[in-house]
Image (spheres, rainbow, N blue to C red):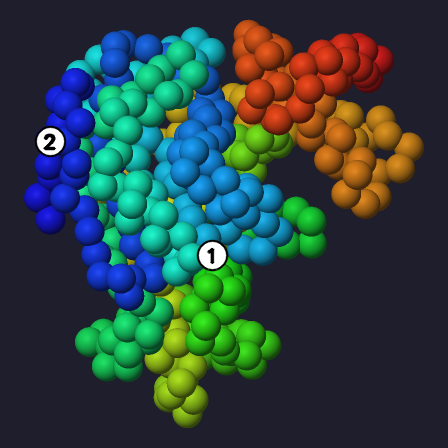
Amino acid sequence: MALRKRTKKSSVQLNLSWSGKTELVGLVLEVVPCAASYLYPQYTVGLHAWFLDQVRQTDPKLSAYLHDSQSEKPFTISGLEGSLLSTGKNLHLQANETYRWYITVLSPSVIPWLAQWVQKLPEIIELRNAPLIIRAAEIALDPTTYKDLLETSRTSPTTKLKLSFVSPTSFRRKKHHFPLPVPNNLFHSYLRRWNDFSGINFEQEEFLAWVDECVLIQRHRLESIKVTAGKKGSVTGFTGAIELGLSSTASAQPEFEQLFYALGQFAPYCGTGHKTTFGLGQTRLGWLEEEKEPASSTQAILAQRIAELTEVFLLQRKRTGGTRAKDIAETWATILARRELGEPLQAIATDLEMPYQTVKTYAKLARRALADS
């Protein structure tokens, strides 16, 4: 689909439409900074909040579901793709530089809202200190249905599945990050979302046993990286590409072989691993040979500092087991690390969705605890 250009003052409705039967789709917006400006390292929190606010303005009930639901999230967003340079404590957005921002929706319940929203996109993405003009939009991932993904995978033209992870990707395993694309983790991630939204459910335990037995890693090119993601804490993830094949025994269960290829086609829509609504786990089909820009040094420095402080605060707590101690340690670490980079407490409180006074108190407690360590 050709891009439809818009000027800053225009209110042109972009010609983005799809069948009423559509259940999944991916969009990419081309955006340009209003002027040369700076982003804070955890700016994907702002993109996440802006997108949810767009939903809230027209469908508060759907917004509450997207924000608060404890089930699988029915959408993903990327970070900004383009030239993001580290400048001291921030990321530099260049004037007149075009950046690309991806949004995918993988639930039939969200598609009707998206179909209305794209007919009259807002002019500006309001991002703290760095508003972005929406200049163009196009469909990045074809509108489709879960049934079509499954049917087209019945006669897959290839015996290999190649996936590229273009943003840091990680899984949760035993309450820790697991930064490796082990087939069992990949397909567990995809099948959870598939079963949640498709209405075509498969038995998880049996399929994953088949994956463990039949899915082979034939080659990979991976790099690990620590990044900030979500509202607090840091994540150790991986980027790169992987090629998967099937053993000779895979065809003994043709329904699982078909599902294997269908989930591979599904991966770009749903993303891989966790925190996919904050830019992690962006996945593309194929082996992408081009070099991807590494995470900025500012983001990497912040992530490393949060990890270091989390460890310090966790060791100081008398009870280090369970999730509460780690949650508090990560919150303190995130607040203090961002303060060390010069971010105002009010901005941190907004991102964390916490009262300003609470964040102020936590900052003081964190500094005191660090001094006592």
* Residue at image location 37% in from the left, 21% down from the top: 126
In the image, residue 240 lies at what x, y percent? 36, 47
Classed neighbour count for the residue bearing mark 1: other residues with Cα under 10 Å, few (<14), some (14–19), many (≥20): many
User: Please, which residue is most extreme toward the left here?
Assistant: 2
In the image, residue 180 lies at what x, y percent? 50, 53
Q: Toward which corner of the image does residue 336 lie, by quadrant?
A: top right
Asked whether 275 or 123 is in front, the reply is: 123
Q: Give the distance between the C-alpha atoms of the residues marked 1 and 2, in whole angstroms.
A: 38 Å
366 displayed left or right of 104: right
For label 1, the residue is 181
Q: Toward which corner of the image does residue 37 lie, by quadrant?
A: top left
Q: Do we see residue 122 in this rendering?
A: yes
Helix, strand or loop under label 1: loop
Q: Toward which corner of the image does residue 246 lie, by quadrant?
A: bottom left
Asked whether 12 or 37 is in front, the reply is: 12
Is residue 350 placed above or below 21 in the rendered structure?
above
For label 2, the residue is 5
* Residue at image location 43% in from the left, 9% down from the top: 88
User: Please, which residue is most extreme toward the bottom here?
Assistant: 252
* Residue at image location 69% in from the left, 30% down from the top: 330
Can you say which quadrant of the picture contains the C terminus?
top right
166 displayed left or right of 209: left
Sequence-wise first label, 1 or 2: 2
Q: Amino acid at mark 1?
A: Pro
Asked whether 113 or 23 is in front, the reply is: 113
In the image, residue 271 lies at what x, y percent? 41, 52
Classed neighbour count for the residue bearing mark 2: other residues with Cα under 10 Å, few (<14), some (14–19), many (≥20): some
Nearer to us of marks 1 and 2 is: 2
In the image, residue 158 lies at what x, y percent? 23, 74
* Residue at image location 91% in from the left, 32% down from the top: 318
Q: Amino acid at mark 2?
A: Lys
Helix, strand or loop under label 2: loop
